[in-house]
Image (cartoon, helix red, strand yellow):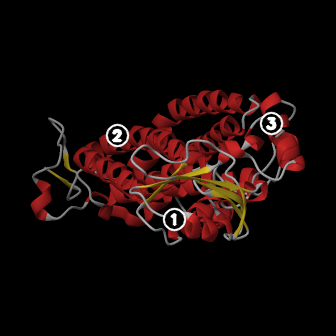
Amino acid sequence: MRRPLLAGAGVLTVLLVAASPVLGLRFGLPDERTLPAGTSARTTSETIHREFAAEPTDTVQIVLAEPADTGAYAARLSRIPGIFQVDAPDGRYQDGRYTGAPGQDRLTAPDGRARLAVVPTQQALYDDVPALVDRIRDTPAPATALVGGYPGETTDFRATLLDRLPLAVGLVLGATYVILFLMTGSVLLPLKATVLNLLSLSVMFGCLVWVFQDGHLSGLLGFTPTGSIEPSIPVLMFCVAYGLSMDYEVFLLARIKEEHDRTGDTERAVAEGIRRSAPLITAAAGILALSFLSYATGGVVFLKELGIGTALTILVDATLIRVVLLPVTMRLAGRANWWAPRPLRRLRVKEPGAGVDVLRGEYV
């Protein structure tokens, strides 16, 4: 509190360095490497990848919406890099050439519509599967082509999840901002809480990239890095970690607001609020961090990501964020902490018998 700029700059530098790997975040689809080494399913998949050219179980299925000639279309599909072969009703195609009878039955429906089975190479399934599916969908077809199969399903799942992510994040941030405003009567404190929470979450995502995407500490933690992060896990971690961080924020702000209502002294209120809240936040953070760290003992990479990332966020939030950056920002803002535009003042929540108008910082 005596040297807010020095303390804030030092901690902010540490957090930004820890969060910097998030700039290299890459979302990808899971494969057998998410399972522990030596399990039957992983060993089988690794053997197929190493010793066989393609895996028909991961075939991209295409259904044409109306009857059409599929020969030229199948030839074009077979020329796409990463495609091993294409089975069409009139035969099998490889590298743009007809190679014989189709290897699958029932590729034509009773109404004349056709199904094509596009078999990717093993290497294509280890690389960018959504990009491969996009190239297939961009290939001109003789009729409307519906692209599915496991690669298509996982690609559409990732796209749908990421498309709705901004809306979900916006709803979470907007709802918590409104609730904190109603509690504090301030437009600055909810904004400050949002920024600090996002800062702690960026450290969590930086950890995911540095440890699990890039593979640092993979030997110690016992997993195989894949070079990408499955998108549903960070979304889940965001919801859990943001909620826990906001809990700590509410604990602190409630105590700080009570003291400010009583005295009108922001600096004293911050110090007293932290003193009164510290035991509860420290105990809760310790218990939660240990609970989440237990996930790191699991063999599945997803559990390790959830456990280590969330535990790190909780510890960072309960120490560097709430004990340093929160008092620093409130100390620098001073009376502006409690300001709100006149039209919004009537919406504030004022406790019965409060001795201070929390919006103006004046006794009433």
Q: Position of residue 121 (x, y in %)?
A: 75, 57
The residue singled out by tag 2 in the image is 254
Q: Position of residue 62 (x, y in %)?
A: 52, 54
Q: In screen coordinates, is 308 left or right of 42?
A: left
Q: Which of pointers 3 and 1 indicates the residue nearer the eye? A: 1
Measuring 58% from the left and 34% from the top, which residue is drawn there? 285
Q: In screen coordinates, is 141 left or right of 164?
A: right
Earlier in the chain: of badge 2 and badge 1, it is 1
Residue 312 shows up from this direction: yes
Placement of 191 over or under 234, stated as above or below: below
Earlier in the chain: of badge 3 and badge 2, it is 3
Measuring 77% from the left and 53% from the top, which residue is drawn there? 122
The residue singled out by tag 3 in the image is 42
Q: In screen coordinates, is 185 left or right of 173?
A: left
Determine the secondary structure under disc 3.
Answer: helix
Give, as a three-letter code, the residue at label 3: Arg
Q: CA distance from mark 3 to mark 2?
A: 50 Å
Placement of 283 over or under 273, stated as above or below: above
Q: In screen coordinates, is 286 left or right of 236?
A: right
Q: CA distance from mark 3 to mark 1?
A: 30 Å
Measuring 58% from the left and 28% from the top, which residue is drawn there? 283
Determine the secondary structure under disc 2.
Answer: helix
Give, as a three-letter code, the residue at label 1: Arg
Measuring 26% from the left and 50% from the top, which residue is drawn there? 178
Residue 341 or 76: which is nearer the viewer? 76
- Asked whether the residues under the numbered discs 3 and 2 touch, taking CB atoms below 8 Å apart as contact, a structural biologist would say no
The residue singled out by tag 1 in the image is 137
Q: Position of residue 325 (x, y in %)?
A: 53, 57
Earlier in the chain: of badge 3 and badge 1, it is 3
Q: Position of residue 228 (x, y in %)?
A: 68, 56
Q: CA distance from mark 2 to mark 1?
A: 54 Å
Q: Which of pointers 2 and 1 indicates the residue nearer the eye? A: 1
